[in-house]
Amino acid sequence: MHEGSSPRDEGGGNPNGDERRLLDTLEHLLDIRATDLKGALDEASDLVAEAVGADKADAFLLDPASTTLVAMGTSDTPMGRQQHRLGLNRVPVANSGRAVEVFQTGDSYRTGHADEDPHVPCRSASPGGEEPRWIALSTVVTLVWD
């Protein structure tokens, strides 16, 4: 994993709290009951965002027709909804960036300083003409299934 910081610990810095929270998340991921792909990926994204304390989590799939990564699952958060409203849920592979890098290499990526990484599209336009917000935490992993 690049820039290896551990997930935020809501248990006061106790590593066992981190492990327990992540194990609980894995158990909940295995318990997803959605019968359609989008519903399952949305639910998984919610669980991951909550587990790592992120403002947003996405589950990208490749659309081979357009060679674009598409966030088929996005956490139900204000930033996740804004991303879709702005059409930022599609990442052309040709544009590069961290999501594409993770997709191509299979290496995970996590940072608490996405605002300082030029390869992370960090700006999220705020509603009502407010100053854009920066995404501070970014975690990207590759999941492979058969």
Image: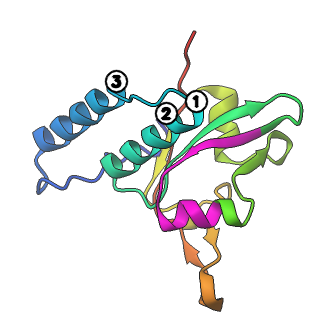
Give the CA separation, mark 2 to mark 1.
5 Å
Residue under label 2: 40
Residue under label 3: 30
Q: Tell me: residue 11, above or below residue 128.
A: above
Q: Quadrant of the C terminus?
A: top right
Q: Residue at x 59, y 26 (%)?
A: 106
Question: Can you give x and y, in whole percent of width and height, for residue 80 in the image?
Answer: 55, 59
> Which type of secondary structure does the marked residue at label 2 adopt?
helix
Task: Evaluate whether residue 55 shows in this view.
Answer: yes
Q: Tell me: residue 50, above or below residue 142.
A: below
Q: Residue at x 69, y 65 (%)?
A: 85
CB of mark 1 within 8 Å of CB of mark 3? no
CB of mark 2 within 8 Å of CB of mark 1? yes
> Which type of secondary structure does the marked residue at label 3 adopt?
helix
Residue under label 1: 37
Task: Evaluate whether residue 122 shows in this view.
Answer: no
Most extreme residue toward the front is 35
Q: Is residue 113 left or right of residue 9?
A: right
The boundaries of the magenta stretch are 69-83
Most extreme residue toward the right is 65
